[in-house]
Amino acid sequence: DAKTTQPNSMESNEEEPVHLPCNHSTISGTDYIHWYRQLPSQGPEYVIHGLTSNVNNRMASLAIAEDRKSSTLILHRATLRDAAVYYCILRDVAYNFNKFYFGSGTKLNVKP
Amino acid sequence: ETGVTQSPTHLIKTRGQQVTLRCSSQSGHNTVSWYQQALGQGPQFIFQYYREEENGRGNFPPRFSGLQFPNYSSELNVNALELDDSALYLCASSLVGGGPGETQYFGPGTRLLVL
Protein backbone atom coordinates (compact mmCIF):
# COMPACT_ATOMS: atom_id res chain seq x y z
CA ASP A 1 0.00 0.00 0.00
CA ALA A 2 1.19 3.48 -0.85
CA LYS A 3 2.34 5.55 2.10
CA THR A 4 1.60 9.13 3.09
CA THR A 5 3.79 11.70 4.82
CA GLN A 6 2.39 14.47 6.98
CA PRO A 7 3.93 16.99 9.38
CA ASN A 8 3.67 15.89 12.98
CA SER A 9 1.96 19.07 14.15
CA MET A 10 0.67 22.43 13.01
CA GLU A 11 -0.74 25.44 14.74
CA SER A 12 -3.40 27.90 13.64
CA ASN A 13 -5.26 30.87 15.00
CA GLU A 14 -8.99 30.70 15.40
CA GLU A 15 -11.01 31.92 12.41
CA GLU A 16 -8.00 31.78 10.09
CA PRO A 17 -7.59 29.31 7.21
CA VAL A 18 -5.48 26.20 7.74
CA HIS A 19 -3.68 24.25 5.04
CA LEU A 20 -2.72 20.71 6.04
CA PRO A 21 -0.29 19.11 3.56
CA CYS A 22 0.13 15.45 2.67
CA ASN A 23 2.73 13.84 0.41
CA HIS A 24 1.96 10.57 -1.35
CA SER A 25 4.61 10.25 -4.01
CA THR A 26 3.95 6.53 -4.64
CA ILE A 27 0.22 6.93 -5.21
CA SER A 28 -1.28 4.64 -7.82
CA GLY A 29 -3.87 5.52 -10.42
CA THR A 30 -6.67 3.81 -8.50
CA ASP A 31 -5.89 5.29 -5.07
CA TYR A 32 -8.45 7.66 -3.63
CA ILE A 33 -7.22 10.29 -1.18
CA HIS A 34 -9.21 10.35 2.04
CA TRP A 35 -8.94 12.62 5.03
CA TYR A 36 -10.18 11.68 8.46
CA ARG A 37 -9.78 13.49 11.74
CA GLN A 38 -9.79 12.27 15.30
CA LEU A 39 -10.93 14.55 18.06
CA PRO A 40 -9.69 13.83 21.59
CA SER A 41 -11.25 10.72 23.10
CA GLN A 42 -13.23 9.91 19.96
CA GLY A 43 -12.94 7.59 16.99
CA PRO A 44 -11.84 9.00 13.63
CA GLU A 45 -14.46 10.77 11.53
CA TYR A 46 -14.64 11.30 7.79
CA VAL A 47 -13.72 14.74 6.49
CA ILE A 48 -13.41 14.57 2.70
CA HIS A 49 -12.10 12.46 -0.15
CA GLY A 50 -11.14 12.83 -3.80
CA LEU A 51 -9.45 11.17 -6.76
CA THR A 52 -8.14 13.80 -9.17
CA SER A 53 -10.21 16.96 -8.98
CA ASN A 54 -10.41 19.40 -6.11
CA VAL A 55 -13.35 18.77 -3.82
CA ASN A 56 -15.41 20.90 -1.48
CA ASN A 57 -17.89 20.00 1.23
CA ARG A 58 -19.35 21.68 4.25
CA MET A 59 -16.38 20.75 6.41
CA ALA A 60 -13.39 21.44 4.20
CA SER A 61 -11.81 21.59 0.77
CA LEU A 62 -9.34 19.15 -0.74
CA ALA A 63 -6.79 20.42 -3.23
CA ILE A 64 -5.04 17.67 -5.21
CA ALA A 65 -1.84 18.34 -7.14
CA GLU A 66 -1.94 17.75 -10.86
CA ASP A 67 0.51 14.82 -10.59
CA ARG A 68 -1.45 13.54 -7.54
CA LYS A 69 1.74 13.15 -5.52
CA SER A 70 0.52 15.56 -2.89
CA SER A 71 -2.70 17.02 -1.56
CA THR A 72 -3.79 19.71 0.88
CA LEU A 73 -6.73 19.74 3.24
CA ILE A 74 -8.06 23.26 3.66
CA LEU A 75 -10.11 24.36 6.63
CA HIS A 76 -11.41 27.75 5.60
CA ARG A 77 -11.97 29.15 9.09
CA ALA A 78 -10.50 27.13 11.92
CA THR A 79 -12.47 26.90 15.12
CA LEU A 80 -11.44 25.51 18.49
CA ARG A 81 -13.53 22.45 17.68
CA ASP A 82 -11.24 21.70 14.72
CA ALA A 83 -8.36 20.87 17.07
CA ALA A 84 -7.71 17.23 16.26
CA VAL A 85 -5.31 14.79 14.61
CA TYR A 86 -5.83 14.82 10.85
CA TYR A 87 -5.02 11.70 8.84
CA CYS A 88 -4.37 11.56 5.12
CA ILE A 89 -5.11 8.07 3.82
CA LEU A 90 -4.85 6.42 0.43
CA ARG A 91 -7.54 3.91 -0.38
CA ASP A 92 -7.25 1.60 -3.35
CA VAL A 93 -10.71 0.88 -4.63
CA ALA A 94 -9.40 -1.86 -6.89
CA TYR A 95 -9.49 -4.30 -3.98
CA ASN A 96 -10.05 -4.40 -0.23
CA PHE A 97 -11.53 -0.99 -0.55
CA ASN A 98 -12.63 -0.80 3.01
CA LYS A 99 -9.16 -1.19 4.44
CA PHE A 100 -7.44 1.98 5.52
CA TYR A 101 -3.79 2.43 6.42
CA PHE A 102 -3.38 5.33 8.81
CA GLY A 103 -0.07 7.09 9.30
CA SER A 104 0.77 9.18 12.34
CA GLY A 105 -1.27 12.16 11.17
CA THR A 106 -0.93 15.88 11.84
CA LYS A 107 -1.95 17.20 15.22
CA LEU A 108 -3.63 20.56 14.68
CA ASN A 109 -3.67 23.02 17.53
CA VAL A 110 -6.02 25.99 17.25
CA LYS A 111 -5.27 29.04 19.32
CA PRO A 112 -8.08 31.37 20.41
CA GLU B 1 -30.04 6.19 12.02
CA THR B 2 -27.91 4.87 14.86
CA GLY B 3 -24.15 5.19 14.78
CA VAL B 4 -21.47 2.64 15.56
CA THR B 5 -21.43 1.61 19.20
CA GLN B 6 -18.81 -0.34 21.12
CA SER B 7 -18.74 -2.05 24.47
CA PRO B 8 -17.32 -1.90 26.99
CA THR B 9 -15.83 1.59 27.00
CA HIS B 10 -12.96 0.61 29.28
CA LEU B 11 -11.51 -2.70 30.35
CA ILE B 12 -8.65 -3.86 32.57
CA LYS B 13 -7.17 -7.34 32.16
CA THR B 14 -4.06 -9.13 33.29
CA ARG B 15 -1.42 -10.68 31.09
CA GLY B 16 -2.41 -14.09 29.76
CA GLN B 17 -6.14 -13.52 30.01
CA GLN B 18 -8.60 -13.42 27.15
CA VAL B 19 -10.86 -10.54 26.18
CA THR B 20 -13.90 -10.02 23.95
CA LEU B 21 -14.82 -6.61 22.60
CA ARG B 22 -18.13 -5.91 20.91
CA CYS B 23 -19.28 -3.63 18.13
CA SER B 24 -22.67 -2.79 16.73
CA SER B 25 -22.48 -1.53 13.15
CA GLN B 26 -24.30 1.46 11.78
CA SER B 27 -27.71 0.54 10.45
CA GLY B 28 -27.56 -0.90 6.93
CA HIS B 29 -23.79 -1.50 6.93
CA ASN B 30 -22.57 -4.99 6.08
CA THR B 31 -18.83 -4.64 6.62
CA VAL B 32 -16.93 -4.15 9.84
CA SER B 33 -13.25 -3.41 10.35
CA TRP B 34 -11.24 -3.46 13.55
CA TYR B 35 -8.27 -1.27 14.35
CA GLN B 36 -5.79 -1.07 17.21
CA GLN B 37 -4.55 2.37 18.23
CA ALA B 38 -1.60 2.58 20.60
CA LEU B 39 -1.14 5.79 22.51
CA GLY B 40 0.16 8.59 20.29
CA GLN B 41 -0.08 6.56 17.08
CA GLY B 42 -2.51 6.21 14.23
CA PRO B 43 -4.94 3.29 14.08
CA GLN B 44 -3.52 0.01 12.75
CA PHE B 45 -5.76 -2.28 10.71
CA ILE B 46 -6.38 -5.66 12.37
CA PHE B 47 -8.95 -7.29 10.09
CA GLN B 48 -12.20 -6.80 8.27
CA TYR B 49 -15.36 -8.91 8.12
CA TYR B 50 -17.87 -9.05 5.29
CA ARG B 51 -20.83 -11.43 5.20
CA GLU B 52 -19.57 -13.13 8.36
CA GLU B 53 -16.20 -14.02 6.87
CA GLU B 54 -12.78 -12.48 7.35
CA ASN B 55 -11.99 -10.35 4.32
CA GLY B 56 -8.49 -9.02 4.78
CA ARG B 57 -6.09 -9.00 7.70
CA GLY B 58 -3.30 -6.75 8.85
CA ASN B 59 -0.05 -7.74 10.54
CA PHE B 60 -1.56 -9.22 13.69
CA PRO B 61 -1.01 -12.72 15.11
CA PRO B 62 -3.72 -15.43 15.11
CA ARG B 63 -4.51 -14.80 18.78
CA PHE B 64 -6.47 -11.83 17.42
CA SER B 65 -9.68 -13.27 16.02
CA GLY B 66 -13.14 -12.04 15.23
CA LEU B 67 -16.71 -12.83 14.42
CA GLN B 68 -19.43 -11.11 12.49
CA PHE B 69 -23.04 -12.03 13.14
CA PRO B 70 -26.04 -12.09 10.77
CA ASN B 71 -27.17 -8.74 12.14
CA TYR B 72 -23.69 -7.41 11.20
CA SER B 73 -22.61 -6.85 14.78
CA SER B 74 -19.11 -8.04 15.50
CA GLU B 75 -16.71 -9.26 18.16
CA LEU B 76 -12.96 -8.96 18.50
CA ASN B 77 -11.33 -11.65 20.62
CA VAL B 78 -7.78 -11.49 21.88
CA ASN B 79 -6.24 -14.52 23.58
CA ALA B 80 -3.15 -14.70 25.76
CA LEU B 81 -3.08 -10.98 26.38
CA GLU B 82 0.29 -9.25 26.37
CA LEU B 83 1.24 -5.91 27.87
CA ASP B 84 1.64 -4.45 24.37
CA ASP B 85 -2.03 -5.19 23.66
CA SER B 86 -2.90 -2.19 25.79
CA ALA B 87 -4.52 0.20 23.34
CA LEU B 88 -7.71 1.77 22.07
CA TYR B 89 -9.61 -0.71 19.90
CA LEU B 90 -11.75 0.86 17.22
CA CYS B 91 -14.52 -0.64 15.20
CA ALA B 92 -15.60 0.86 11.89
CA SER B 93 -18.55 -0.07 9.72
CA SER B 94 -19.14 0.57 6.05
CA LEU B 95 -21.21 -0.59 3.12
CA VAL B 96 -19.43 -2.69 0.54
CA GLY B 97 -20.51 -1.69 -2.92
CA GLY B 98 -21.36 1.79 -1.80
CA GLY B 99 -19.13 3.22 -4.46
CA PRO B 100 -15.85 5.11 -4.39
CA GLY B 101 -17.34 7.69 -2.05
CA GLU B 102 -17.84 5.09 0.58
CA THR B 103 -16.58 6.02 3.99
CA GLN B 104 -15.95 4.20 7.23
CA TYR B 105 -17.88 5.15 10.32
CA PHE B 106 -15.95 4.66 13.52
CA GLY B 107 -17.17 3.92 16.99
CA PRO B 108 -15.77 5.63 20.09
CA GLY B 109 -13.51 2.69 20.87
CA THR B 110 -12.78 0.42 23.80
CA ARG B 111 -9.79 1.31 25.93
CA LEU B 112 -8.00 -1.90 27.01
CA LEU B 113 -5.35 -1.90 29.69
CA VAL B 114 -3.33 -5.06 30.24
CA LEU B 115 -1.47 -5.28 33.56
Image (cartoon, coloured by chain):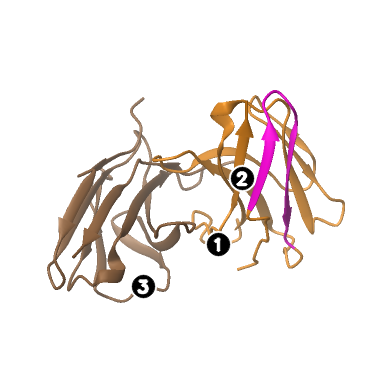
Chain colours: A orange, B brown
- Numbered disc total: 3
Residue picked out by circle 1: A95
Residue placed farthest to the right in the image?
A: A66
Q: Measured along the vertical axis of the image, is residue A13 above or below residue B32? A: above
Left or right of A39 on screen, residue A58:
right
Q: Chain of mark 3?
A: B
User: Magenta part mainly helix, strand or loop?
Assistant: strand
Q: Secondary structure at mark 1?
A: loop
Question: Which mark, by number, is residue B27?
Answer: none
Q: Residue A79 vs residue B77: left or right?
A: right
In the rendered structure, which segment of residues is drawn in magenta?
A: A9-24
Neighbour tally class for label 2: few under 14, some 14-19, many 20 plus, Cα within 10 Å: many
Q: Are marks 2 and 3 in contact (CB under 8 Å)?
A: no
- Mark 3: which amino acid? Phe
Q: Find out whether the residues at labels 1 and 2 contact each other: C-beta distance under 8 Å.
A: no
Return the chain for callout 2: A
Q: CA distance from mark 1 to mark 2?
A: 19 Å
Q: On the image, numbered disc 2 is attached to which residue? A: A35
Q: Residue at label 3?
A: B60
